[in-house]
Amino acid sequence: MTTGTSKRGAVLAVLTALTLGSGVTAAVTLDSGPPPVTAAPEPSPTGPPVRSALLPAPAATSPVPTAAGLGTAVGAVLTDPALAGRLSVSIVDASTGEPLLERTARTPVIPASTAKIATAVAALTALPADQRLTTQVIAGAVPGEVVLVGGGDPTLAGAAAQPESPELARLPELAAQVRSAMGATVVTRVLVDESLYSGERIGPGWKPGYLTEGSVAAVGPLMVDGGRVRPGMSRRHGDPALAAGKDLATLVSPGAAVTVERGVAPLGAAQLGAVTSPPVPQLVERMLSRSDNNLAEALARQVAIARGQPASFAGAAVALGQVLAEVGVDGVSLADGSGLSRLNQIQPAALSRLLARAASGTEPRLAPVLSGLPVGGFDGTLADRYRVGKGAGPGAGAVRAKTGTLEGVIALAGLVQTADGRLLAFDLTADGVPPGALGGAEKALDRLAGSLAACGCR
């Protein structure tokens, strides 16, 4: 989670209050279809977000924006050369879920990292709120041998990681438990067990460069610090599980020669130690606020396990689709949980409806979708946006949204409060952006969302 449960909870309370009010306005549809694109990864921030912020209190009476008012407010941005002919828009009233403005909103696009919103909804729906991911060490088959068993927790923190809130599972604590359980026996061999997952380590539709540039680690159930060489760095280990085994070996037998290999825990062997992650709702918040690709893939695999599917990319894709269908969501087709894949296809209208559903307050289990969204100008992947020079710009503090960036794609999906206090859910996806033009398209999307915050749109 970004800055502690108290601030996130306070933001949620404000967002819940903002959904008061009712009214229905017919949508205006603007026709323009995006061309096909190729994709490349969105960089994931490695440091903690700056801080959280509360949205302003809603007005006593919050009128619903009209289609004409919205069209006037965003018309200039819609004709921005950085977006012309490539922008899909879905804006809905968060209180009612009624569409207010649509532009090719029912045409599937490559969502980039805004796909994490769908993964979040599926995880919060399919998994118990108190579920945690457990990393354990099991006694090996011979004296001096231990087995480090991955439980799918990519947030497992190493010795160099700084304390965070909520508290993460920590490898040094696990090592201390092992040393205590082993007594005088010296650990001479560490096996790493990744049997929880199956299938490929690189997702369908991913570019091999995703791993080398550090956007994601090879997907597996065992890694420390997200598979990073050091906390705060983007560079990842080529084999995160073996690196985790070596870290454990250093902690349990400092200065000794310890063999680290792959293996499987013996059936019925004694547990020597275990540490657990924060519960699923807090993992969802962290995944959204930091755009954590490995955590998104981990949550997708937990959904697969819960639905009896293989813990693989294919199994997770099936399970995510099953859960979203069960809750009545259509227009979403995922090949991975993170949004890195070029094969993902989502209708912008589907994401805006999901966000409105989470904001309605009728499904409390979806609350972390709201509290996990970065705040414009303040934290997460929006910390450096919605600012002008050293001051806050339009939308700062009023826009909460998930970003998405791939080669040729810029997306923004979230919630914004209008000047009249009405809460809107939106998905803005610029698909087919030419090389070198992503920065301009990103600024245009920020202006579009900021213009919604600045207007009453009546």
Image: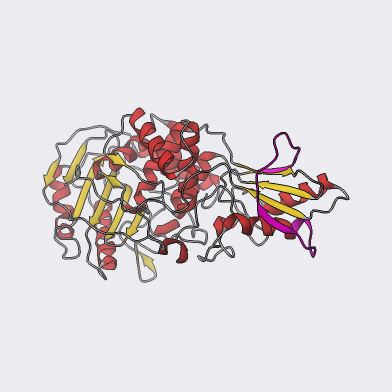
Q: Residue at x 49, y 40 (%)?
A: 311
Residue 24 in the image, given as x and y percentages of width and height? 19, 33
| Relative side of 447 to 27, left or right | right
Q: Residue at x 28, y 35 (%)?
A: 330
Task: Return the residue nearer the eye: 304 or 146.
Answer: 146
Task: Residue 261: say if magenta.
Answer: yes
Task: Return the residue nearer the eye: 182 or 21.
Answer: 182
| Rendered image quadrant of residue 181 | top right
Residue furthest right in the image: 184
Q: Is residue 145 above or below residue 438?
A: above
Q: Residue at x 13, y 60 (%)?
A: 79
Task: Return the residue nearer the eye: 33 or 252.
Answer: 252
Task: Residue 128: say if magenta.
Answer: no
| Relative side of 46 to 105, left or right | right
Residue 182 in the image, given as x and y percentages of width and height? 83, 47
Task: Return the residue nearer the eye: 320 or 452.
Answer: 320
Q: Which residue range is magenta in the image?
A: 251-275
Q: Is residue 5 above or below residue 224?
A: above
| Relative side of 246 to 121, left or right | right
Residue 458 in view here: no
| Rendered image quadrant of residue 403 | bottom left
Count of numbered labels shown in the rendering:
0
| Rendered image quadrant of residue 381 | bottom left
Residue 328 in view here: yes
Residue 106 in the image, given as x and y percentages of width and height? 19, 42
| Relative side of 212 to 277, left or right | left
Residue 247 in the image, given as x and y percentages of width and height? 68, 59
Q: Quadrant of the C terminus?
A: top left
Q: Residue at x 46, y 55 (%)?
A: 290
